[in-house]
Image: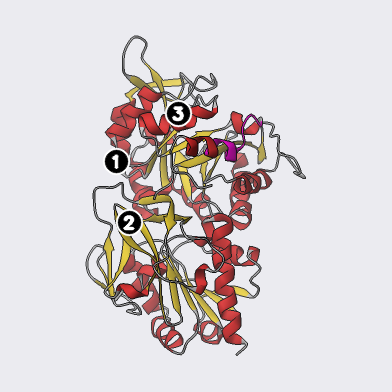
Amino acid sequence: MIAIIDYRMGNLRSVQKGFEHAGVRDVVVTDDPEVVRAADGIVLPGVGAFRDASANLKASGLWELLLSRVAAGTPFLGICLGMQLLASVGLEDGEWEGLGMIPGTCERLPGGVKIPHIGWNTVAYPRESRLFDGIPADTAFYFVHSYHLRPSDPSCIIGSTEYGVPFAAAVQAGSAYAVQFHPEKSSDMGLRLLANFGAIVTERGSR
Amino acid sequence: MLMKRVIPCLDVHEGRVVKGVNFIDLRDAGDPVELAAAYDKEGADELVFLDITATHEDRPLMLEVARRTAEEVFIPYTVGGGMRTSADIRAMLSAGCDKISMNSAAVAAPGLITETSRIYGSQCIVVAIDARRVPGSSRWEVFVSGGRTNTGLDAVAWAEEAERLGAGEILLTSMDRDGTKDGFDIDLTRAITRAVNIPVIASGGAGELDDFAEVVIEADADAVLAASVFHFGQFSVRQVKEAMAAHGVPVRL
């Protein structure tokens, strides 16, 4: 079972339905720590402010649980704000603690371009990853964001996008994957990515 | 590289698409959700549903369309038309749409732009501007209520104000060109894209395949929107994108 974490940061119906359309079964939306603990895969979506997201996760008792499940090797997929939260520190309207699964900061996109970055942008692959299996390099995905995750060690970057400057569109550290774009809004190729995550979860579960 | 977007617009009346669409293989050509899925397959980057009923009694129908679209179509979509209050906007966003577009309501109560963009983020607040050239001048005025009422507002000044108030995008329709098939209004679109630092969607006047690239190249539009050329099957979304690509415009193919 894959648990999509509901921590009151946006509508999660599209993410759940996206998995279903991608042929991934047994996907639930939950805020129940017991369900998350039992899950074979965890998805952290989210749209909104870093501070609220961080506070909501802590208040729901899911913060430590997410860290321990990922440390134990449970496949994890962060989407948009759910990727940014993996940083050690969020620098949106202050300084906020992030989950720290990816050492680095969550910073505002540099100026000189229209912000927020809205629309379809291409993703290049600095290195290979199962998450992009069957998805050609330079495929366009749908982005909506003003902040981005800037890892201290760029070797975790599995997808890179250019908007004024190059930034991390996708990262991987151990069993934790995260994407800045919205696979659930990126048509066929987005659904393919969700299917790939589903396959990663299934494979680990059957070991 | 950031792609230029091609956005079909669907007019919805009492929960049904009103203009005929020449897609083959549709079970129900009036079902907005089925049409949306067909446009997604054709390569549309986004969709706009314009609720032309816009009476209070019919709101639940549009909410249902938004809910079903969120469950069955996996590209971003905007709903516009008839939303007057913060509560209307909240209900529509909770139904699952990505952005809402406001036109008359934004002019009547500009504070609504600020209030809703603070709560939901500017990326989901689109301000739609219907503009008509003041005859014999290089100024455009803003019309509301489906183009029936001249507000006297200067279109460029209103676009700047909308950005300042928190709008995340401008959906700009040239009333002079709308329905003429004479091409997009380059002068108007350029005046607006130069004035604001948020994406501008150009609308009104598409008639030939080359019109789409022209407004992007000549007027710096971030996206192009059209209704009838798609609905009546004159062009497919893919044909439009291929024509844009042939002019060197980056599009998702």
Q: Chain of mark 2?
A: A
The image quarter in which residue B25 lies: top right
Q: CA distance from mark 2 to mark 1?
A: 14 Å
Q: Amino acid at mark 3?
A: Thr
Name the residue beneath numbered marker 2.
A146
What residue is shown at x 55% (from left), y 76% (from top)? A3
As displayed, is residue A89 above or below residue B45? below
Q: Chain of mark 3?
A: B
As displayed, is residue B29 above or below residue A207? above
Density class for disc 2 (Cα within 10 Å; few <14, some 14-19, many ≥20) is some
Q: Is residue A20 left or right of residue A145?
A: right
Tag 1 secondary structure: loop
The image quarter in which residue A71 lies: bottom left
For residue B173, the mark is 3
Density class for disc 3 (Cα within 10 Å; few <14, some 14-19, many ≥20) is many
Q: Coloring scheme of the render? A: secondary structure
Q: Which residue range is magenta in the image?
A: B233-241
Is B238 colored magenta in this rendering?
yes
First reached walking from the N terminus: tag 1 or tag 3? 3
Nearer to us in this view, B156 or A161 = A161
Image position, residue A58 (x, y; %)? 37, 79
Name the residue beneath numbered marker 1.
B197
